[in-house]
Amino acid sequence: MNTITVNIIDILLIEDNPGDARLAKEALKDSKMRNSLSHVEDGEEAMKYLRREGQYSNMRRPDLILLDLNLPKKDGREVLAEIKEDADLKTIPVVILTTSSDGDDIIKSYNLHANCYITKPIDLEQFVAVVRSIEDFWLTIVKLPKPELC
């Protein structure tokens, strides 16, 4: 008897704007790939989640992180730096998904080893299209590292 293994892609969305978080969740809900989306609203919670501290002790390591830069408590730049400096986390691809189109933010994010930088469109349909393009690229084309090998 053959069994088919369906891989579920674990995505961590780090976003403080409830509207943008809802849109991203909706766009990924109808994904071509099975995914599990977790959401935290600030940088401190993001690091607790990633380090599996406290209430996050049973969470799986995400395969992909969608990170806003302008977060409360600890901003996205600090979160990105911590992720990429941590030997256990640095192989997780981080997609910056933010409203900032500032050249300095783009350069700083890439200098901190962001895997890509996307400016959120203001238009609802374009925002959904951007999230779906992230899904198309990162979840269907790119080979993500397996957590047990990292």
Image (spheres, helix red, strand yellow):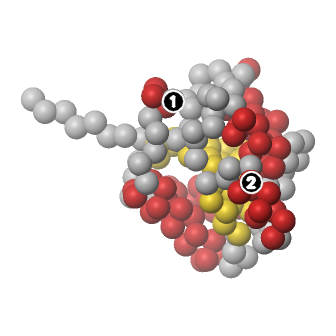
Residue under pointer 1: 150
**Upstream in the sequence, badge 1 or badge 2?**
2
**Mark 2 falls on what kind of element?**
helix
Does residue 66 appear in the picture of this structure?
no
Report the quarter where the N terminus lies.
top left
**Mark 1 falls on what kind of element?**
loop
Q: Locate residue 100, reporting x and y percent.
A: 80, 67
In the displayed structure, does residue 88 sit left or right of residue 112? left
Instruction: Please rate how many residues cluster around mark 2, counting C-alpha atoms within 10 Å: few if below 14, some from 14 to 19, many from 20.
Output: few
Q: Residue furthest front?
A: 111
Indicate whether 12 appears above or below 1: below
Q: Locate residue 122, reporting x and y percent.
A: 73, 76
Q: Locate residue 102, reporting x and y percent.
A: 83, 70
Residue under the image location 67 percent in, 24 percent down: 52
Residue under pointer 2: 111
Residue under the image location 57 percent in, 64 percent down: 131
Does residue 40 appear in the picture of this structure?
yes
Instruction: Please rate how many residues cluster around mark 1, counting C-alpha atoms within 10 Å: few if below 14, some from 14 to 19, many from 20.
Output: few
Tell which of 86 and 65 is nearer to you: 86
Q: Which mark is residue 104?
A: none
Residue 2 falls in image quadrant: top left
Residue 127 falls in image quadrant: bottom right
Indicate whether 111 appears above or below 81: below
In the displayed structure, does residue 122 sit left or right of residue 127? right
Q: Is label 1 in contact with label 2 (beta carbons under 8 Å)?
A: no
Q: Residue furthest right?
A: 73
Q: Locate residue 48, reporting x and y percent.
A: 74, 29
